[in-house]
Image (cartoon, helix red, strand yellow):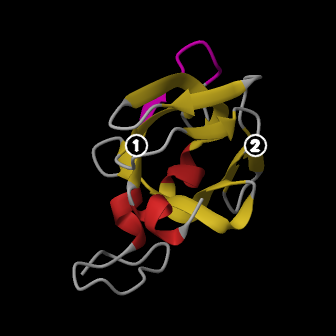
């Protein structure tokens, strides 16, 4: 994808507690993803190439096959990441596609949501993980 296409592709990650897991020490979460394609091209992703990289552990997305998102459309994948520890949701991690060159959002969940908008400050500068958005 070109730089312009990346800029016009938005990601929203939603956090929900997994009540089927043992949450006695710390809660365990699942993360779902919504992709919105604001380009004029169909974009495609391998479902098993998304990475939730937190200081606690690296989690590879579940799912197989290709996710295709048509121009002007959105697609959602429920429970893209499972067994996400609570500490991994506090902003020190990053959600990526393939590698660290393709950051999608920092894992700084606000009201159980992290979006690709959290990669930048309001003035357009790059936002560092764990720092408040300015």
Given residues 74 and 103, the one toward you in this image is 74
Q: Which residue is mark 2?
A: 49
Q: Residue at x 40, y 43 (%)?
A: 37
Q: Residue at x 70, y 49 (%)?
A: 51
Q: Which mark is residue 45?
A: none
Q: Position of residue 62 (x, y in %)?
A: 73, 27
**Is residue 32 highlighted in magenta?**
no
Q: Secondary structure at mark 1?
A: strand
66 left or right of 3? Answer: right
Mark 1 or 2, closer to the camera: 1
Q: Residue at x 70, y 32 (%)?
A: 47
Q: Visible in this render: residue 1?
A: yes
Q: Residue at x 32, y 75 (%)?
A: 132
First of labels 1, 2 by sequence position: 1
Residue 102 lies in quadrant: bottom right
> What's the distance in space between the residues labelled 1 and 2, CA to CA?
18 Å
Q: Which residue is mark 1?
A: 37
* CB under 8 Å between discs 1 and 2: no
Q: Position of residue 10 (x, y in %)?
A: 39, 50
Q: Which residues are magenta?
A: 14-22
Q: Position of residue 130 (x, y in %)?
A: 46, 73
Q: Secondary structure at mark 2?
A: loop
Q: Visible in this render: residue 30?
A: no
Question: Looking at the rendering, in which quadrant would you find the C terminus?
Answer: bottom left
Q: Note whether 21 is above or below 2 in the view shown.
A: above
């Amino acid at each position: 994808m070109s730089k312009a296409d990346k800029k016009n592709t938005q990601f929203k990650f939603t956090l929900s507690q997994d009540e089927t897991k043992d949450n006695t020490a710390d809660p365990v979460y699942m993360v779902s993803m919504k992709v919105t394609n604001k380009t004029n091209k169909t974009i495609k992703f391998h479902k098993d190439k998304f990475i939730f990289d937190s200081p606690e552990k690296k989690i590879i997305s579940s799912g197989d096959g290709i996710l295709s998102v048509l121009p002007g459309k959105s697609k959602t994948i429920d429970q893209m990441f499972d067994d996400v520890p609570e500490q991994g949701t506090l902003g020190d991690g990053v959600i990526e596609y393939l590698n660290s060159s393709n950051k999608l959002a920092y894992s700084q969940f606000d009201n159980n949501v992290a979006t690709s908008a959290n990669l930048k400050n309001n003035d357009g500068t790059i936002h560092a993980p764990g720092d408040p958005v300015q």
